[in-house]
Image: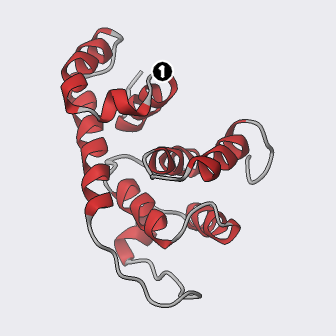
Amino acid sequence: MKETVLDVLMYLFENYQEGEFSDSDNQVTLRDELVAAGFPDQEVAHAFDWVDGLAQQRQLPIIFSPGGAVRIYAREEMSKLSTECRGFIMYLEQLGIFGAQARELVIDRLMALNEEIDLERVKWVCLLVLMNEPDAEDAFAHLEEMVYYSGEFLH
């Protein structure tokens, strides 16, 4: 079975606390554990680059126009993210699960994946982004419930 970067990220999410895999001191030990668990070394390295990229993107200032603005997707984003995926992102934003900044982080991290993006992958990336957002515990819990336990917007 071909493991992808998102498979590694999902494994990290399900088996480790956020601080364990975002702390660079622990990454060497975790890399060894992930490779020993059967994940390809290259995908593990890409997964940690992805997590580091998330941390870097969170630190960049993002300036948004007044509320009610519509997100226009670039051609590359539209070709990688289906209407269903873009609709789910908009749905979460409309529910107030995340705002414009988190939306942009989700889109950035989806575009950073070198694999096909489907709705399941979007849900996981949304969870990973919210997991790393300060003061987003309630939003994270709501989305986690939607993804794991609810039939809401699930196939």
Disc 1 crowd rating (10 Å Cα; few below 14, some 14-19, many 20+) is few
143 displayed left or right of 8: right
148 displayed left or right of 3: right
Q: Secondary structure at mark 1?
A: helix
Q: Amino acid at mark 1?
A: Asn
Rendered image quadrant of residue 99: bottom right
Label 1, on which residue? 15
- Tell me if residue 153 comes above or below residue 37 in the rendering: below
Residues 43 and 54: in front is 54
Residues 65 and 37: in front is 65
Quadrant showing the N terminus: top left
Residues 1 and 67: in front is 67
Where does the image place residue 141, in percent across and percent down from the top left?
65, 44
Residue that extends furthest to the front in the rendered view of this protein: 135
- Residue at figure coordinates x 45%, y 71% from the top left: 78
- Residue at figure coordinates x 72%, y 46% from the top left: 146
- Residue at figure coordinates x 36%, y 11% from the top left: 37
Where does the image place residue 102, in percent across and percent down from the top left?
46, 63
- Tell me if residue 14 comes above or below residue 115 in the rendering: above
